[in-house]
């Protein structure tokens, strides 16, 4: 065998070896792809089945039924409030919609987007922008404009009592207390002066609500990051709290719930939540009674279920997804289909 023939045979051998390696590589790649496609994804042990949590077949049901709904032709409806006569006020964009007997009565135009509203027992309307509050009369005319709360301010809720007005400020992590002339008196920061739980209000997202104590003794403030509701006297002293974290129907889950709260005339509470969209009823001691509206009542993912209650205890729920003020009444057939 001459030198040229020997080299040719060596080249053929090398090419054959490379070809075998290429075929082996392709087959290995195809096997890996097939295993990747057919292998089931590993389960995240920390992931909750939100669809399952939204089912309420076995959850306690409160005796509430939806009895009506008021359409809200507003851009981005944000908050609602009822006066003593049952007139409904709803803010959205730069407007406040006034509804009487289920029909639009008027619109109040303002120069900034309105974040939240409330009405006191005398019919005076309080509207909050991001950093300041204005006071309007029953005709919607400006009566007073209160001071700016600073560049960090982001007002999320307002509660107007007989002598004091409480303003929840997500940006500054505190509740401001004003007198009825707009004089700033002090702030409630949620810090217990006795040294317990020095963190104050924990507010991971811009939902920070409050409701007047119907007994006239201060205010109930949601501490959403602690998943509970806290009571403060007019002097700013915390005297108690209720609510606990968890995934059961009676508990509050996620980073920061409840998002909204109202106390009913009988002293019981109604709360709304995000994540699991639901509205629940609690006793005046914070014991879970049942649902006002279970998760199946709302579009998945809806947030901003603002609340208010009429003198007769009817609950009004702002549903931004449906652009309605939905009305619920207790004492009817339980909410079970």
Image: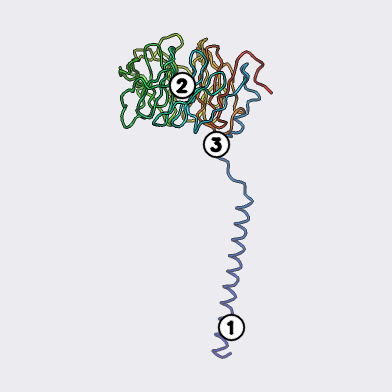
- Residues at discs 3 and 1 in contact (Cβ within 8 Å): no
| Vertical side of 228 occupied by 331: above or below | above
> Is the residue marked by circle 3 packed among few (<14), some (14-19), or many (20+) residues within 10 Å?
few
Q: Position of residue 181 (x, y in %)?
A: 32, 16
Q: Nearer the viewer, residue 275 or 270?
A: 270
Q: Which numbered dot is residue 228?
A: 2
Q: Earlier in the sequence, mark 3 or mark 1?
A: 1
Q: Which numbered dot is residue 9?
A: 1
In the figure, residue 29 lies in which quadrant?
bottom right
- Residues at discs 2 and 3 in contact (Cβ within 8 Å): no
Q: Earlier in the sequence, mark 1 or mark 2?
A: 1
Residue 210 relative to residue 291: left or right: left
Q: Is residue 113 visible?
A: yes
Q: Nearer the viewer, residue 66 or 236?
A: 66
Residue in the image at 60% along x and 53% along y: 36
> Is the residue marked by circle 2 packed among few (<14), some (14-19), or many (20+) residues within 10 Å?
many
> Is the residue marked by circle 1 packed among few (<14), some (14-19), or many (20+) residues within 10 Å?
few
Q: Position of residue 329 (x, y in %)?
A: 60, 16
**Which residue corresponds to mark 3?**
47
Tag nearer the camera, 1 or 2: 2
The CA span between labels 2 and 3 is 23 Å
State which quarter of the image contains the N terminus.
bottom right
| Vertical side of 61 occupied by 274: above or below | below
Tag nearer the camera, 3 or 1: 3
């Amino acid at each position: 065998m001459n030198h040229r023939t020997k080299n040719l045979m060596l080249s053929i051998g090398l090419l054959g070896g490379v070809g075998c390696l290429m075929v082996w590589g392709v087959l290995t790649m195809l096997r890996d792809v097939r295993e990747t496609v057919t292998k089931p994804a590993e389960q995240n042990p920390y992931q909750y089945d939100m669809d399952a949590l939204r089912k309420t077949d076995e959850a306690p049901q409160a005796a509430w039924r939806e009895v009506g709904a008021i359409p809200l032709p507003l851009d981005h409806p944000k908050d609602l409030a009822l006066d003593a006569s049952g007139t409904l006020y709803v803010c959205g964009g730069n407007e406040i919609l006034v509804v009487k007997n289920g029909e639009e009565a008027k619109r109040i135009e303002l120069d900034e987007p309105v974040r939240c509203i409330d009405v006191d027992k005398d019919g005076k309307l309080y509207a909050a922008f991001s950093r300041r509050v204005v006071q309007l009369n029953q005709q919607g005319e400006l009566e007073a404009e209160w001071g700016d709360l600073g560049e960090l301010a982001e007002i999320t809720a307002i509660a107007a009592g007989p002598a004091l007005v409480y303003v929840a400020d997500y940006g500054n992590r505190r509740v401001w207390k004003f007198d009825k002339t707009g004089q700033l008196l002090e702030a409630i920061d949620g810090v217990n002066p006795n040294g317990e739980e020095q963190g104050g209000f924990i507010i991971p997202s811009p939902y920070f609500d409050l409701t007047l104590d119907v007994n006239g003794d201060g205010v109930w403030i949601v501490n959403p990051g602690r998943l509970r509701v806290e009571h403060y006297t007019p002097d700013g002293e915390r005297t108690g709290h209720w609510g606990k974290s968890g995934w059961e129907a009676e508990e509050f889950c996620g980073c920061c719930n409840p998002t909204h709260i109202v106390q009913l005339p009988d002293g019981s509470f109604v709360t709304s939540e995000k994540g699991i969209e639901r509205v629940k009823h609690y006793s005046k001691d914070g014991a879970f009674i049942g649902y006002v509206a279970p998760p199946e009542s709302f579009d998945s993912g809806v947030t901003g279920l603002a609340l208010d209650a009429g003198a007769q205890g009817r609950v009004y729920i702002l549903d931004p997804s449906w652009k309605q003020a939905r009305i619920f009444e207790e004492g009817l057939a339980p909410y079970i289909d």
